[in-house]
């Protein structure tokens, strides 16, 4: 497992890149206030979001807007812009990516996951 890296933009989710284990890249996201969000972004590979604590409104391109209460799993197809709005203070979720999908032939290009 690689080292933890933290990232935060005002009004947005705290992100902690936790690394990889067993071929899965995982990132923790924490939204302290219900008025904050995970800004619209996309990834070139499929991923799942596991909502561990709180409530989210998920807006995924070409899909109906949905609300989720923990525990819940949200599937996000590759290339679809998505935004998460916290509906409760202290919302916590993890985004998981299969590293075999990140680069043709396997392997991991974290830039593909983190920069979009």
Image: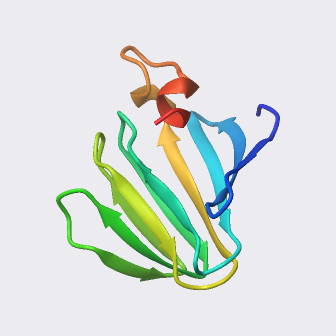
- Of residues 35 and 90, which is closer to you in this image? 35
- On screen, residue 76 above or below 26: below
| 15 relative to 42 in the view: left or right | right
Side of 41 where 77 appears, left or right: left
Q: In this view, does 81 lie to the left or right of 23?
A: left
Q: Where is residue 37 drawn, in percent x and y? A: 54, 66
Instruction: Specify the farthest residue to the right.
Output: 3
The N terminus sits in image quarter: top right
Would you identify the image quadrant in which residue 100 lies?
top left
Which residue: 70% across, 37% down?
19
Tell me if residue 69 comes above or below residue 22 in the rendering.
below
Nearer the observer, 12 or 106: 12
Identify which residue is drawn at 50% across, 30% down: 99
**What is the x, y in percent for residue 103?**
42, 19
Q: Where is residue 40 in the image (x, y as percent from the top left)?
A: 41, 53
Which residue lies at the image location 40% right of the left edge and 39% below the top edge? Answer: 43
Q: Residue furthest front?
A: 10
Q: How is the image coloured?
A: rainbow
Q: Which residue is at a point 47% across and 27% down the rendered structure image? A: 112
Q: Residue furthest left?
A: 62
In x, y percent, where is residue 111? 54, 25
- In the figure, is residue 35 to the left or right of 1? left
| Total residue callouts | 0
| In the foreground, 18 or 58 | 58
């Amino acid at each position: 497992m690689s080292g933890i890296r933290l990232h935060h933009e005002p009004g947005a989710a705290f992100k902690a890149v936790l690394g990889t284990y067993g071929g899965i890249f995982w990132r923790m996201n924490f939204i302290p206030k219900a008025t904050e969000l995970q800004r619209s972004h996309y990834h070139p590979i499929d991923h799942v979001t596991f909502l561990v604590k709180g409530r989210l409104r998920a807006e995924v391109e070409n899909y109906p807007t949905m609300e989720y209460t923990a525990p819940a799993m949200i599937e996000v197809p590759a290339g679809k812009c998505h935004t998460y709005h916290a509906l409760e203070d202290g919302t916590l979720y993890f985004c998981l990516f299969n590293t075999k999908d990140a680069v043709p032939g396997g392997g991991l290009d974290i830039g593909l996951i983190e920069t979009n």
